[in-house]
Image: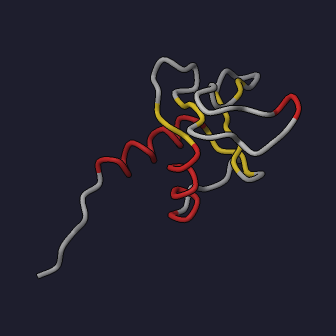
Amino acid sequence: MKARITKSVLSGMRAAFTPDLTSPSGLRWARWNGTTGTRSREAGDVAGSCTNSGTYVVTLEGSKYLAADVLLALHRAQHRTAVVSA
């Protein structure tokens, strides 16, 4: 089972990923992912990897998330409006 996307996780995702529908996973790295070696990714690289079932998974701070869930959460956060109480 993949990790849940909470508000604190979402803020980290907003800093780490950008939506890009030309990418196979729908996401690209907005910054260097902080790793070295073969897992290192630079800003603009495709985020995530394809599983055996064909779904894409992204890893952030050691937790795995479905790329489709991350894309949906980023989209909703981008179009969310603040509610002002009177």
**Quadrant position of residue 17:** top right
Where is residue 4? Give x, y as percent: 61, 56
Q: Is residue 37 left or right of residue 56?
A: right
Give the vertical position of 30 relative to 76 (above or below): above
**Quadrant position of residue 86:** bottom left
Which residue occupies 71% across, 42% down? 33
Farthest-out residue, left: 86
Where is residue 43? Give x, y as percent: 61, 33
Q: Is residue 8 left or right of residue 81?
A: right
Which residue occupies 58% across, 55% down? 12
Q: Foreground residue, 53 or 77?
A: 77
**Quadrant position of residue 46:** top right
Give the vertical position of 36 relative to 23 (above or below): below
How many numbered discs sit on the rendered protein?
A: 0
Give the vertical position of 66 relative to 61 (above or below): above
Which residue occupies 56% across, 38% down? 30
What colour scheme does the image use?
secondary structure
Where is residue 16? Give x, y as percent: 58, 45
Farthest-out residue, bottom: 86
Which residue occupies 75% across, 45% down? 34
Give the vertical position of 36 relative to 11 (above or below): above
